[in-house]
Image (spheres, rainbow, N blue to C red):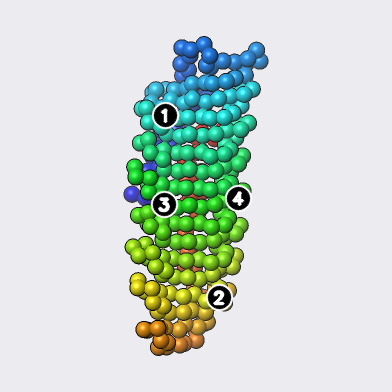
Amino acid sequence: MNKNSILLILLTFLSISIAQNPHIHDEEEKINQKDKKGRKQGEWHFFDEKEEIFVMSNYKNDLLEGNSIFYKKDKLLFRLNYSQNQLNGVNEAYKKGHLVLQVELKNNKLDGALHKYKGHKKQIQCIQNYKNHKREGEAKYFKKGKLFVLANFQNNKLHGLYTEYYPATGKKKIETTFENGIPTGIQNIYDKEGNKIASKTIKKGLLVEEISFKGGKEVSRKNIKERITVVFSKEDTNKLLFKNMFHYILPH
């Protein structure tokens, strides 16, 4: 199963018109109140039509303001923060009551740190930073809780030092640099024991020289002129995940 598919399953439970056709439970006089102009004020409680998802939200002048908390069968599903009907601050998504995604937002856009976790053990999968919905600065990716990739971004493109590790040992596997998404400079490759086995010279994505090593000594050197494949080329799946997960709870 695709690593995002489990989280996307949650969307099927959110594709309901909670905000459009709420079945309101107003046993308490202090909740679900409107002012003289018919605007929602204060704390409101909602259920979906099947009464599986329960939402507690806060309003000011008919706009979401402050915390909105979603539950499914008594299990926490989302913990959101709104300011004038837009998501702001730290927002969280849960699976079976366990935190799986924590993101910082500014006016419905990723802006700040994103943490993605897996399973009930809260095993970290990635830490990324965003600015105005684009990856910016340092990013860390993990396999089974072990650091796998340490990368840097500028304006959503790889820029600066990129390092790939052997997760089991934490030793470097590949070290290279990027400039505006294109590999350039010296790329060093290491074996599992940490010995350098190759060094490649790259100029703006074009491999021009490759040196091989054995036992710390150079064994071959050859000139090459070929376009290389970008080491790290996967799309921003976290941004896509965020878009899908929050589609039904963003104010429209």
Residue 234 image offset from top left, x and y in percent: 47, 59
Dot 2 corresponds to which residue?
Answer: 185
**Quarter of the image containing the C terminus?**
top right
Dot 1 corresponds to which residue?
Answer: 71
Q: Amino acid at mark 4?
A: Lys
Residue 70 image offset from top left, x and y in percent: 45, 30
Residue 35 image offset from top left, x and y in percent: 63, 15
Q: Nearer the viewer, residue 7 or 141?
A: 141
Q: CA distance from mark 4 to mark 3?
A: 20 Å
Density class for disc 3 (Cα within 10 Å; few <14, some 14-19, many ≥20) is many
First in sequence: mark 2 vs mark 3: 3
Q: Amino acid at mark 1?
A: Tyr
Which numbered tag is attached to residue 131? Answer: 4
Q: Residue at x 48, y 61 (%)?
A: 150
First in sequence: mark 1 vs mark 3: 1
Q: Residue at x 44, y 70 (%)?
A: 174
For numbered disc 3, what is the local secondary structure? strand
Q: Is residue 64 visible?
A: yes
Dot 3 corresponds to which residue?
Answer: 125
